[in-house]
Image (cartoon, rainbow, N blue to C red):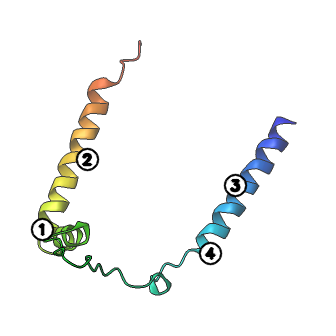
Amino acid sequence: MVKVKTTILTLIFLATLIVLLAATPWSGEEMGSYSFEPREGYRAPESGIGDIGVEIFTLYLVAFEVLSLVLLAALIGAIYVARKELPR
């Protein structure tokens, strides 16, 4: 009986996931523009999250990729150090 409940819940979860993925506007055309206009009397911000993202994935792409590999190596090393030795 537990196996049937698990199967039903899994199918419901997968169906929900498929519906949500199908309904997501991946192209971004329906989302509109991301322009920001400050209120009258205020100046526009000098930088923003969008500017940082553009620079990371264009100007600093190699450094970003190298940093991701260093962090991955550190994570693997931490897992190796933290794991327990199995008795033989």
**Residue nearest the observer in this picture, 2 or 88:** 2
- What secondary structure is marked by label 1? loop
Amino acid type of the residue that numbered disc 2 sits on in the rendered structure: Leu
- What secondary structure is marked by label 4? helix
Task: Estimate the spatial distance between the alpha carbons at disc 3 and disc 2, rounded to whole Å.
Answer: 30 Å
Q: Residue at x 41, y 12 (%)?
A: 87
State whether residue 33 is above or below residue 43: below
Return the residue found at the far bottom: 29
Residue 80 relative to residue 69: left or right: right
Q: Which mark is residue 60?
A: 1
Sequence-first tag of 3 and 2? 3
Q: Quadrant of the N terminus?
A: top right
Tally the marks: 4
Sequence-first tag of 3 and 4? 3
Task: Estimate the spatial distance between the alpha carbons at disc 4 and disc 1, rounded to whole Å.
Answer: 33 Å
Tag 3–tag 4 contact (CB < 8 Å): no
Q: Give the x, y percent position of residue 17.
A: 64, 62
Question: What residue sits right under mark 3 in the picture?
Answer: 13
Sequence-first tag of 4 and 1? 4
- What secondary structure is marked by label 3? helix
Q: Residue at x 17, y 71 (%)?
A: 45
Amino acid type of the residue that numbered disc 3 sits on in the rendered structure: Phe
State whether residue 67 is above or below residue 30: above
Task: Estimate the spatial distance between the alpha carbons at disc 1 and disc 3, rounded to whole Å.
Answer: 39 Å
Q: Which mark is residue 72?
A: 2
Q: Counting other residues with Cα less than 10 Å from the Cα at mark 2, is it few (<14), some (14-19), or many (20 or more)?
A: few
Q: Give the x, y percent position of residue 40.
A: 23, 79
Question: What residue sits right under mark 4 in the picture?
Answer: 22
Amino acid type of the residue that numbered disc 4 sits on in the rendered structure: Ala
